[in-house]
Image (cartoon, helix red, strand yellow):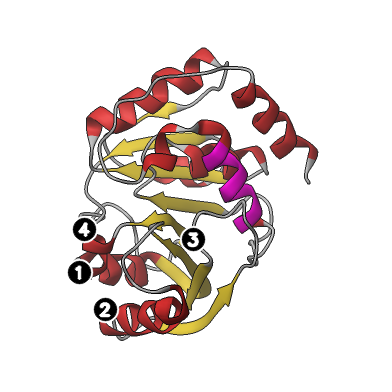
Amino acid sequence: MNDKLEKILKLVESTPVKFKTFSNDTQQINPKARVTSIINILGEIQLPINNSTIVDIGTGYGYGAILLNSLGYNVIGIESNKDKLYEGLKYWRRLGFNFTLINKLSDELRHNRNLYFLPRDARNLEDFPDNSIEMVTAFYISGYMLGKDKAFREVGRILKPGSHFILSTQGPTSVPHLLRGLAVKILTSLYIPNDLRHYKTVKINNPNVYDNYIITMVK
């Protein structure tokens, strides 16, 4: 495990928190479990070169954005649920992390290794230029968001050609495990805009990952 990621994991292990619950994804309110899960996902995906800009949509309490920034990326975490986001930011500030809360994107934000959080619905990225972002992530995307096709179109618009959109689906589900991979492929194929294509779906056999299927789309 990367030393910086391991340091964050140890930090959250030693700093308990009682988050408000906003969904049935109970792992969200367990920093140790969620950080462990996303660290394992990061070990299975192809990340861009350092200094790249990554947009983490549906960042929730900020786990993915924090971890990606620790690896040397300029990260913009986007979350529509302001209450959830602010709960997370209080926690990370308590742990000593530095970040900036913004209300719109400006060009200078995309050329450093800083961490930003933007309270906004991912369907509205109009201030993000076309072909400007090296990667978009959506860790544990909830089922209802798969129907937000405008968000997917926006992801396709802002990504640079050849860049990846990484998403994992929400955890426990009523879909039988043997059908899970097929269901994920079908659901994602229904909402992929013309400028994105399905690249691969990886099954991760790791008990520390909340859901076993990680989808990569490519511009």
Q: From what the image shows, is residue 51 above or below residue 163?
A: above
Residue at screen point 38% across, 77% down: 184
Q: Secondary structure at mark 3?
A: loop
Bounds of the magenta span?
A: 33-41
CB atoms of marks 1 and 2 within 8 Å:
yes
Disc nearest the viewer among 3 and 2: 3
Q: What residue sits right under mark 4 in the picture?
A: 123
Residue situated in front as seen by the camera: 215 or 48? 215
Residue 141 picture quarter = bottom left
Q: Nearer the viewer, residue 149 or 52?
A: 149
Q: Is residue 99 left or right of residue 47?
A: left
Q: Residue furthest top?
A: 94
N-term-proximal mark, 1 vs 2: 1
Mark 1 crowdedness (10 Å alpha carbons): few <14, some 14-19, many ≥20: some
Q: Which mark is residue 211?
A: 3
Which circle's residue, 4 or 3, is located before the other in the chain? 4
